[in-house]
Image (cartoon, grey):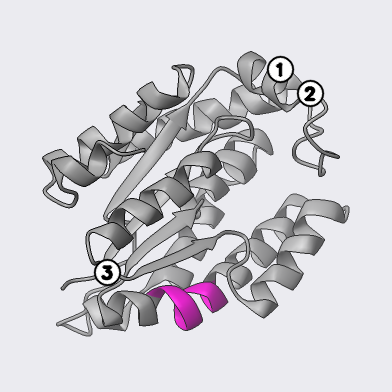
Amino acid sequence: MNGLFISFEGIDGAGKSSHIDGLAKAFTEQGRAVTLTREPGGTPLAEKLRTMVLNDAMDPLTEALLIFAARRDHLVNVIEPALARGDVVLCDRFTDASFAYQGGGRGFNLGVLSTLEQWVQSSPALQADSSQIILRQPHLTLWFDLAPEIAAARLVDARTPDKFESQPLAFFQKVVAGYATRVAADPRRFARIDAAAERHQVWQQITRVLVQKGWLSIMVAARP
């Protein structure tokens, strides 16, 4: 079977993480091997960089460089090998988060982020012609779209916030706008999920997309 790469995007509190395990179980029941991972993180090195990014003070360029360094290690050591094996890779955030959080929320230079994306995500496995650069991107990105006000209410007393979760509402409004810009630039890759809906309705939205693509059977999708 061909490998399948699905990323989950959205602001903290959108509920994406609660559905990743359910989708992993659905694919497993269908006989697929699943690699469940996250960003920043996914490898021992990337997890160390994640701790720094989420907790240490740094300027936006340093933050972006660390995130893309973690992404490169993650791609080389986890994502690409899993796709080569034919796994379904389910990743909690990927590059869209960098454009939303660093680009939108921080207001960091989108051109620099695009350059880093080109450097880090060039995939020799995809290149029949060495003169052509093809980037590793998810086959599908599920964007959990939720108003920042609702997300903030969900996160009250949930856990000790990291430096991103503790940002003001205006920051997350910019992050959501950053996601929307990213979606508009590549609409065929994205599926918008109304994350304000009830949990079972969110699951139905997710599985409907996967059934329509022929990646998940109707019977498996019906069991959240």
29 within the magenta span? no
Q: Amino acid at mark 2?
A: Val
The label nearer to you, 3 versus 2, is 2
Q: Residue at x 54, y 46 (%)?
A: 97
Residue with the mark numbered 2: 156
Disc 1 to disc 3, C-alpha distance: 40 Å
Task: Please tell me how crowded label 1 is: few (under 14), some (14-19), or many (20+) other residues with Cα within 10 Å.
Answer: few
In the displayed structure image, the side of residue 40 where residue 140 appears, left or right: left
> Looking at the rendering, which quadrant does residue 45 occupy?
bottom right
Q: Residue at x 71, y 21 (%)?
A: 152
Disc 1 to disc 2, C-alpha distance: 6 Å
Residue 134, labelled with which disc? 3
Which element type, helix, strand or loop, lies under badge 1? helix
78 within the magenta span? yes
Residue with the mark numbered 1: 153
Q: Is residue 9 above or below residue 6?
A: above
Residue 163, labelled with which disc? none
| Tag 1 and tag 2, C-beta contact below 8 Å | yes
Q: Which residues are magenta?
A: 72-79
Prevailing secondary structure of the magenta residues: helix
Q: Is residue 32 above or below residue 223?
A: below
- Viewer-proximal residue among 98 and 85: 85
The quadrant of the image that shows the C terminus is: top left
Question: Residue 139, can we see it?
Answer: yes
- Viewer-proximal residue among 81 and 15: 15
Which element type, helix, strand or loop, lies under badge 3? loop
Which element type, helix, strand or loop, lies under badge 2? loop
